[in-house]
Each structure stands twice: as C-alpha cells, then as structure tokens.
Amino acid sequence: MIYSLVILDADLRTRAVCEQVLKSKSLSEIRFAGLATDVHSGKKLLTKTKPDILILGDDLGKDCLSTILADPKFATAPSTIIAADSSKYSMAALKKGAIDYLLKPLDHEMLEEGLMKSLSRLSQINKTTGDTSLPPIGQRLLIKNANGTYLVSKASIIRCQSEEGYTTIFCQGKHPSLVLSKTLKSVEAQLKEDRFVRVHQSHLVNLDAIVDLETEAKGMVLEMLDGARIPVAHRRRSFLLSRLPSI
C-alpha cells in the first residue's frame, strides 16, 4: 500500500533530509505529496491531499507551531512527526497525538526511525479497518461539523478529546479526526451505551482501542491505537479498571 507524506515547514533542509531518507527501500511505501512553507498554504495543502503522514516544523514564524498545536480546529494526519529546534512544543504535540518529536537539524537515522513508526501505525490502523462490511445503522453515528456531514462507525472511534469548547473525535480509516463545536459531555451521551469510558475531564476513550495501560509516577496512562497517551484521572481509575477483563 502507498502512503502520502506532506511537509509543512519553511526550513527547506527538512525536505532535503526527507528526500534522502525516502530513498531507503524500507520506506518504499511512502510517496512525497507536497510541501508548504507557511500556515495558509499548508492548510490548503492538507485539505487537498489529506496525507497519511505529516512532518510539521517550527520554522513558520514566531510561536507559530505553538499556535497551530493549540488550535482545537487543527487536526493532525493519522501519523504526525514534529521537527523543531527545541523540545518546548513536545507536550502539546503529544496531546495532539504526534507519533514522534525530532530535534533539528534532522538526523537521517532518527527521521527514518520516525517514518518506520508511522508505517507501523498506519499498517495497524488498516488491519483494524480491513473489514469492508458495513455495520448496522444503529452502530453508526451521524457527525456534523463546519466541513460537512459524516456517517461514522462507532467502533472506528478511537477516542474523543475536548479543548476550549470543542471536541475532536479521533477515528480510524477515512476520517481520522473530526472537530465539533460540542462539549465532550454531549458526545459522551451518544456513546455511553457502547464501549466508551470517560477517563478524564477532557478524554473519552474506546475500550477496544486501548493498546496498553501503564502506571507512571504521575498516575495511570493509556496508550491508544492512534499512538496518543491519555492520562487517567485518579477518581476515574477504579471505574475504568472495572470495565476491563481481569484475572
């Protein structure tokens, strides 16, 4: 299968390194689909190409990357790699579901490793969505936002995340992320009878899309199918564990 890659970065060295790395046989499934050096043209390119992989750089103007990642309407590609001069955007990038965070100047081996991670994630998503049979209409959800109306299988929803009055629904397959001007509570009301659990004030997750569960110094964290790491609020931990099979 062929996957498309887009670069959004004014630093042309990013493209140069990427072009060299893409010559590797291990990355033969990736095709370069376009470059944008400013946010305005970048949004147009993302809308037009809907890339599988996005390399998002910080050379787009002062604090521009921070603004992009903070924008609830900005939806990353299924696999996004951040390329930056410092690590100050790392937490925001992880919250957006970025698969890797690379420091500039880009290292060929590190970028190749990041792109291999991208292929692994995309392959996993495709395996999960490989069944082309349509679920019954009762197992699908009609989602309307500023860009259109979509009929989405509830089972394809990985997680939902709220931010500043908006909720982003992260899905597998055709529509990787959909932004709604609705609260997470209203979205939860449509999904609570299914395999969804509110694990945090800002996060609702599909139990079937949990890849792993880890206990860290700051608490419990879920690794989701799209690579996102979701914190579990302490007061919601017991309820989450009660919904998971155990021995």
Image (cartoon, helix red, strand yellow):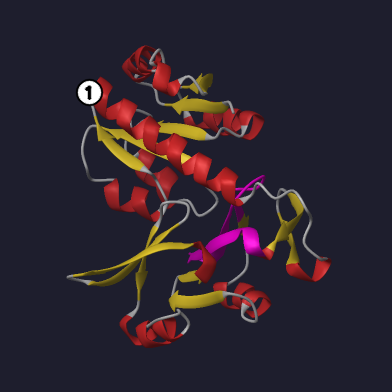
Q: Magenta residues?
A: 155-178
Q: Residue 96 vs residue 110: left or right? A: right
Image spot of residue 190 (x, y percent): 68, 76
Nearer to me, 137 or 129: 129
Q: Residue furthest left?
A: 217
User: Could you say whether the residue bearing mark 1 is in a helix, strand or loop?
Assistant: loop
**Amino acid type, callout 1:** Pro
Query: According to the image, label 1 marks what residue?
Result: 105
149 is higher (above) or lower (below) than 183: above
- The question of residue 9 being in magenta is answered with no
Q: Residue 44 vs residue 242: left or right? A: right
Q: Judge the density around disc 1: few (<14), some (14-19), many (≥20) Cα neighbours within 10 Å.
A: few
Image spot of residue 187 (x, y percent): 62, 72
Q: Residue furthest right?
A: 137
Question: Disc count in the image?
Answer: 1
Q: Image point 63% across, 76% down: which residue?
A: 194
Q: Image point 62% across, 68% down: which residue?
A: 182
**Which quarter of the figure is the N terminus placed in?**
top right
Magenta segment's dominant SS is: strand
Image spot of residue 162 (x, y percent): 50, 66
Q: Quadrant of residue 103?
A: top left
186 is higher (above) or lower (below) than 225: below
Can residue 206 be seen at all in this image of the molecule? no
81 is higher (above) or lower (below) than 209: above
Image spot of residue 121 (x, y percent): 46, 43
Q: Residue 102 vs residue 186: left or right? A: left
